[in-house]
Amino acid sequence: MKKMIIMTIMVVNVFTAYAQLPDPGFEVDSRTAIVITDPQNDFLSPDGVTWGVVGESVTANHTVENLEKLFKVAKEKGMMVFVSPHYYYKHDHNWKIEGALEALMHKINMFDRTHTLRTDGFEGSGADWLDRYKKYIEEDNVIITNPHKVYGPESNDLALQLRKHGVENIILAGMSSNLCTESHMRDLVESGFRVAVVKDATAGAILPGLNAYEASVVNFKMIASHVYDTKEIVTKIKAHKK
């Protein structure tokens, strides 16, 4: 009986240990940069085509304001920011293979641009940056990568740009949480980068029976090196000395 009790206690202890996820931690240093996915009108403006499903989450998380805080502190500290945007051109609408949300994005003309080499109609469109971010994105510390085409950065030059600039540690934020942001996290982790996610500088769609934001936070905690809120990471960046 005593032996059985001891074995039960040991099993409980093992399960308890697994239930408490380790925190690998994340430090801001000279090899750290911020990556922001899709800081664009179609996600973050009340006039954007997805506002009806993401607006509640964006508002609750203060996502727009928190992303601006990241842009601002990066400018103040001279930290590099890599923006990974989402654009669709005319030829992308001829895809023969699509997932559910890809088909929806094309149907509602999300992130549409008229041409790969021109910016006709770009200003103020759903594909354009939120106005309040433009003064930061135009700064020399910000690099805009090629557009990603589905969710992750496998189809753009983000990893190349990060490597070429000597970045090893990434502070990740942007839209939308369980799609582009989470997909960027997964690919960057598997490419050997250390990634921390800013959980209130992102947001997700809320549909009947589906809360995309809550789903993504679970995966952030399981996959990223650390999960911050904006106040925590801004304080950490400000404290970093070059």
Image (tube, grey):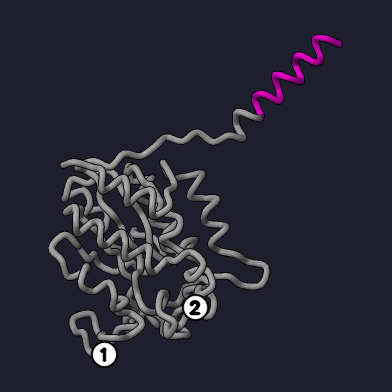
- The kind of residue tagged 2 is Ala
Q: Amino acid at mark 1?
A: Gly
In this view, the residue in front, 15 or 186, is 15
Per the image, label 1 sits on a secondary structure element best described as: loop
Residue topped by disc 2: 103
Report the Cα–Cα distance between label 1 and label 2: 23 Å
Instruction: Confirm whether the magenta stretch covers residue 238.
Output: no
In the depicted structure, whether residue 217 falls above or below residue 90: above
| 95 up-or-down from 170: above or below | below
Q: Which residue is identified by label 1?
A: 121
Q: Are marks 1 and 2 in contact (CB under 8 Å)?
A: no
Numbered circle sitting on residue 110: none
Q: Count the marks: how many? A: 2
Magenta stretch mostly in which secondary structure? helix
- Where, quadrant-wise, is the C terminus in this rendering? top left
Find residue 200 and report its horizontal and vertical position in percent.
45, 59
Q: Residue at x 31, y 45 (%)?
A: 236
Mark 2 crowdedness (10 Å alpha carbons): few <14, some 14-19, many ≥20: some
- Magenta residue check for 9: yes
Apparent side of residue 18 relative to residue 235 in the rendered image (left or right): right
Tell me which segment is drawn in magenta: 1-15
